[in-house]
Image (cartoon, grey):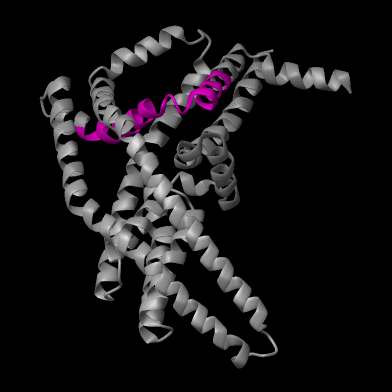
Amino acid sequence: MLEMLMQWYRRRFSDPEAIALLVILVCGFGILFFFHSLLAPLLVAIVLAYLLEWPTTRLERMGCSRRLATSVVLILFAGILLLMVFFVGPVAWQQGINLIRDMPGMLNKLSDYAATLPKRYPALMDAGIIDAMAENLRARMITVGDSVVKFSLASLVGLLTLSIYLVLVPLMVFFLLKDKDQMINAVRRVLPKNRGLAGQVWIEMNQQITNYIRGKVVEMVIVGVVSYICFLLFGLNYSLLLAVLVGVSVLIPYIGAFVVTVPVVGVAMFQFGLGTEFWTCFVAYLIIQALDGNLLVPVLFSEAVNLHPLVIILSVVIFGGLWGFWGVFFAIPLATLIKAVVHAWPESVSREEHLS
């Protein structure tokens, strides 16, 4: 048994390039695990730098210097963000306040409807259970209200941190874009010399991450805009807020779509009842989700769909538990990274065995 383990170790870890790749991965995962909260501004800046690299490169190819191209792209991007903050933000915020304010009335309607169920289905429903469920919902609503107040107070404390981020992140994005080549060369100098396998994995993953971040932003915009138009056509209340939630939900594969369906269906049910309007709106929403999952995602993420859905869900759960939001956001690239390492590792082993 020991000899078999030693043979496995020699076959898998005798290649210096494999050891270098393992050291780089362990160090990278360790830094993210222990310091991800401190590195949050840098992670935001890296994501934005990946997103803005494409237009920056295009302007550079048109004859602009790297500094000028970076400045123009950042100014345009900041202008788009400000337009969204000043036009979309206040409306969505107000709709969120209205939704929280209307929730007690919605719960009362739900309680009244549930109270009629024991009379309609006496063999299936018990009045005591219905009353207990209604009381539990009211208690949870009180808890949610208290949490909202506490969150509002805590958010006031976090305004200073947010203001610092608003200064630091654009500066970091600017330097990441402008001095990209110098920074990459600086990182290469501290990496192990035998990094051929790590370089091979990095080339593949760099392109994957670029396509993933760009594709996620495009998917969020398309799904959010189409959902907003659909909700407006049906006259659904809180249409902009719900459309923003639907757009953001694409960040979490499968789980996000399931979670965001609850408020959409709940609002539609209380507004339209269980009539034709509700079912038409619900079917239209399902069509949007189906087109997103079966048409838009395969087009934008041709490599990511090669991952099994169970692998994607497990990646969201595991990496989300390790690194919170960033683990969820990068769940698919991290799963793809592991897949790329697993596929690349035997190639170096087989090459070594062939040479021997």
Q: Quadrant of the C terminus?
A: top right
Between 347 and 179, the residue placed more toward the observer is 179
**Res 339 quadrant in image:** top right
**Res 166 quadrant in image:** top left
Q: Position of residue 309 (x, y in %)?
A: 56, 52
**Res 5 quadrant in image:** top right
Q: Position of residue 122 (x, y in %)?
A: 67, 90
Between 33 and 331, the residue placed more toward the observer is 33
Q: Quadrant of the N terminus?
A: top right
Q: Position of residue 9 (x, y in %)?
A: 74, 19
**Residue at coordinates 47% horizontally, 37% vertically from top-left?**
333
Residue 48 lies in magenta, yes or no? yes
Between 303 and 36, the residue placed more toward the observer is 36
Residue 249 lies in magenta, yes or no? no
Q: Position of residue 214 (x, y in %)?
A: 32, 41
Question: In this orientation, does residue 286 appear?
Answer: no
Q: Which residues are magenta?
A: 26-55
Question: In this orientation, does residue 44 appear?
Answer: yes
Q: Is residue 66 above or below residue 130?
A: above
* Main SS category, magenta section: helix
